Image (cartoon, coloured by chain):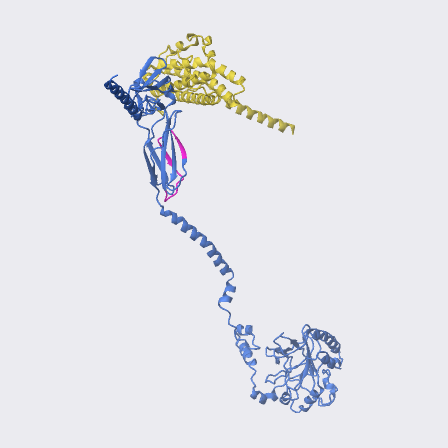
Chain colours: A blue, B yellow
């Protein structure tokens, strides 16, 4: 073998190696097996099928789709590879039959070989999936206080709804802009829908989809959104509510104020205490009779009434010697009990004693002379009986005791028994303590002397005491005043019951000053006064 | 006392009779006649069409459900089905396979096709239901659906016949349709081709045929009485 031949052989080997290397580095191979992705008919009149080519194989590969059909003889190739894009096959109306089975295959081929996909069987009836509805519009419709959303759309343009070939059913879904929760509604075959449960001031997003007969649902349409108005009327019901709620407590407060106006008045305008003059009867003043008014005003003044002393002699109490008997026919005398009379009597003591005194007085009515000797005991029992001295006034208070009945009316807390006293007596009035037992219920006023020296005082002052002057000793019942006859004897029987003071020697005849029946009228001042 | 009870019971009986009579003479009892004769009340053609269309839609829905159930239980591999595929026993009936074909077809022919289909499925469905009842693999729900389906086929056929009558009386359709569709004209149904079919194939075929019927009826309706919902 020559060297040249050997070299040629080596070159050939090298070339072969190179070629094989080159071939392997490029990856040329028969094409991979394509895979069917699926088919779809948007309107039940045409359909499209897609496939996925297998590994490229490096060489230019062509794909072909072949199909066989029920009730159709032979194998046919795809009529349109381009209308629907790459790796697709579009069957137009002429090549589409419904309710028949198609058997599809795709063959990928290149220079090195072929690859066939598996059979894909389909019926157009099963692969119907329409396009999404179009022209979705969203409007906010105002309707008084109930606004609502009005959604409108159109059927996908390639579907035929007029001939009844397909029946489209729609569905829509709504959500708030920021929310992620969709709310779905079925619209049936209507191409519009009203949404009523919307909130004002919100952004709403709506999508629609459809399907043909019992086919697959389409994709959701593009989102359409709208913003609802922020209704100003929202404030109105709020303010109405506020005013309504505030009216109720306001009204109740007013009612309460009106009902309790007196109390309110008392609180806001506390009553200014009116002037209260002791002894003045406001009712009397109100009555307005001048004489009453003047009487009320004057009597209660309580002047020292110096001139009164001058007239003192003229002021005397006229009493009679007659026994005071309770006689309903006689006129009543009255004894005022003034307010100044201060009794620290305990009521029990008073009452008990009063009862006894009353009884005793009753007995005495019939002529028992002696003054109940228990008066001193009364004093002991009621130690705190004090006597407020009386002041002489120019008032007369003659008491026609015998012929007249006297009535003693106790003006309860305001009454006091005012006994006319001589001036000299008055000087010692403070020291004098006369005990007066006052009984409320029987209106009995029992006067008593505790200190018999008082009697002495009386005696001492006898000279000044006018003849007609008597002291009221005891008020017996409603119509009896027992007068104490003043005697100058040292006999302590001065303290005794005095209707017939026969014991007292210094009896002075008392001329009844008053010819006729007289009565003692009670005046608020407490002075016993005889009224003719 | 007994007199009042008797009178009350008589009154109650009368009331009952009235109620019953009313219900009996109500909408159910009055026959639907093609012409508005005395004693029956006439339903409009549009109304009739609506009824049959809805009926057919429901029938197809049931068949769809049953078919999906079957697919879950007995999922046949796609490859198993041969190229020729199944052969439905109704494949001999010529049916338009597209919209244009269906629209081009005369209404008499279309009605005839519908009726043929419905007639052809009466027996197979009844047998299907029987076989389902025997097989305890299926739920009671499926068996009820099968029964309902077979009933609906029967009723739908009657309804379509009524529609055809109405159309003929209204002059919308020529007369000899009915005679063509009479059962005698059809090939004997007991040839039993369908007996050899498996249940799953039967369901598949019926699903397709019920879809056909529904579509054809809708086309007819929208062609003849297009007012409502076309």
Q: Is residue A481 visible?
A: no
In the rendered image of this protein, does residue A532 appear above or below residue B185?
below
Q: Which residues fall within the magenta stretch?
A: A184-202
Q: Nearer the viewer, residue A179 or A146?
A: A179
Q: Is residue B23 visible?
A: yes
Q: How many marks?
A: 0
Q: Nearer the viewer, residue B227 or B75?
A: B75
Please state, as top left, top right, bottom left or bottom right, where the N terminus of chain A lies in the image.
top left
Q: Nearer the viewer, residue A162 or A457?
A: A162
Q: Is residue B97 magenta?
A: no
Residue B183 in picture, x, y percent from top left: 43, 9
In the rendered image of this protein, does residue B47 appear above or below residue A448?
above
Drawn side of residue B138 relative to residue A51, left or right: right
Q: Quadrant of residue A424?
A: bottom right
Q: Is residue A198 magenta?
A: yes
Drawn side of residue A498 relative to residue A86, left or right: right
- Which residue: 51% across, 67% down? A266
Residue B66 in picture, x, y percent from top left: 46, 21
Residue B179 in picture, x, y percent from top left: 40, 9
């Amino acid at each position: 073998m020559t060297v040249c031949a050997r070299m040629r052989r080596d070159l050939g080997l090298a070339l072969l190696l190179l070629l094989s290397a080159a071939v392997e580095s490029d990856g040329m191979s028969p094409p991979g097996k394509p895979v069917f992705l699926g088919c779809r008919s948007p309107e039940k009149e045409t359909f499209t099928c897609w496939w996925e080519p297998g590994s490229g194989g490096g060489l230019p590969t062509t794909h072909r789709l072949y199909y066989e059909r029920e009730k159709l003889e032979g194998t046919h190739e795809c009529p349109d590879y381009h209308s629907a894009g790459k790796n697709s096959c579009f069957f137009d109306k002429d090549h589409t039959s419904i309710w028949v089975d198609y058997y599809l295959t795709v063959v990928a081929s290149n220079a090195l070989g072929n690859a066939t996909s598996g059979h894909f069987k389909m019926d157009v009836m099963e692969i119907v999936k329409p396009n999404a509805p179009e022209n979705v519009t969203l409007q906010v419709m105002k309707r008084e206080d109930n606004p609502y959303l009005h959604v409108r759309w159109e059927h996908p343009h390639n579907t035929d709804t007029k001939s009844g070939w397909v029946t489209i059913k729609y569905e829509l879904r709504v959500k708030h802009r920021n929310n992620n929760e969709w709310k779905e509604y079925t619209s049936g075959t209507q191409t519009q829908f009203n949404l009523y449960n919307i909130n004002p001031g919100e952004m709403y997003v709506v999508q629609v989809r459809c399907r043909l007969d019992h086919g697959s649902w389409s994709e959701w349409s593009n989102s359409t959104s709208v913003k609802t108005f922020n209704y100003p009327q929202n404030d109105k019901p709020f303010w109405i509510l506020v005013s309504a709620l505030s009216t109720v407590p306001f009204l109740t407060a007013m009612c309460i104020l009106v009902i309790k106006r007196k109390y309110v008045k008392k609180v806001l305008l506390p009553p200014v205490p009116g002037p209260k003059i002791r002894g003045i009867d406001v009712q009397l003043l109100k009555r307005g009779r001048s004489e009453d008014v003047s009487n009320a005003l004057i009597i209660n003044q309580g002047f020292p009434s110096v001139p009164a002393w001058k007239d003192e002699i003229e002021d005397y109490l006229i009493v009679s010697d007659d026994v005071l008997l309770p006689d309903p026919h006689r006129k009543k005398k009255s004894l005022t009990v003034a307010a100044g009379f201060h009794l620290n009597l305990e009521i029990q003591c008073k009452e008990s004693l009063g009862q006894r005194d009353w009884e005793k007085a009753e007995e005495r009515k019939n002529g028992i002379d002696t003054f109940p000797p228990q008066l001193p005991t009364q004093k002991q029992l009621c130690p705190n009986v004090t006597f407020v001295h009386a002041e002489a006034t120019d008032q007369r208070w003659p008491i026609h005791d015998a012929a007249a009945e006297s009535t003693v009316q106790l003006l309860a807390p305001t009454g006091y028994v005012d006994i006319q006293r001589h001036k000299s007596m008055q000087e010692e009035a403070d020291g004098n303590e006369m005990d007066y037992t006052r009984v409320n219920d029987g209106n009995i006023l029992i006067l008593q002397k505790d200190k018999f020296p008082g009697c002495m005082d009386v005696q001492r002052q006898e000279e000044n005491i006018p003849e007609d002057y008597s002291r009221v000793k005891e008020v017996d019942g409603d119509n009896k005043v027992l007068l104490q006859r003043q005697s100058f004897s040292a006999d302590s029987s001065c303290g005794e019951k005095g209707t017939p003071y026969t014991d007292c020697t210094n009896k002075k005849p008392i001329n009844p000053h008053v010819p006729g029946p007289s009565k003692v009228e009670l005046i608020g001042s407490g002075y016993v006064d005889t009224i003719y | 006392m007994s007199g009042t009870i008797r009178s009350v019971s008589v009154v109650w009986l009368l009331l009952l009779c009235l109620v019953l009579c009313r219900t009996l003479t109500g909408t159910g009892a009055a026959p639907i006649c093609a012409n508005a004769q005395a004693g029956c009340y006439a339903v409009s053609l549009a109304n009739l069409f609506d009824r049959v269309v809805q009926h057919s839609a429901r029938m197809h829905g049931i068949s769809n459900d049953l078919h999906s159930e079957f697919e879950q239980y007995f999922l046949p591999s796609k490859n198993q089905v041969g190229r020729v595929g199944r052969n439905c026993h109704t494949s001999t009936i010529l049916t338009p396979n597209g919209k244009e074909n269906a629209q081009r077809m005369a209404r008499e022919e279309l009605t005839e096709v519908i009726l043929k289909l419905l007639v052809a499925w009466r027996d197979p469905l009844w047998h299907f239901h029987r076989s389902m009842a025997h097989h305890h693999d299926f739920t009671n729900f499926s068996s009820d659906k099968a029964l309902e389906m077979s009933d609906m086929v029967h009723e739908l056929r009657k309804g379509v016949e009524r529609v055809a009558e109405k159309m003929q009386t209204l002059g919308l359709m020529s007369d000899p349709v009915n005679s063509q569709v009479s059962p005698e004209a059809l090939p004997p149904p007991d040839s039993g081709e369908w007996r050899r079919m498996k249940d799953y194939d039967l369901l598949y075929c019926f699903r397709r045929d019920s879809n056909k019927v529904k579509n054809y009826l809708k086309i007819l309706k929208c062609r003849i009485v297009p007012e409502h919902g076309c």
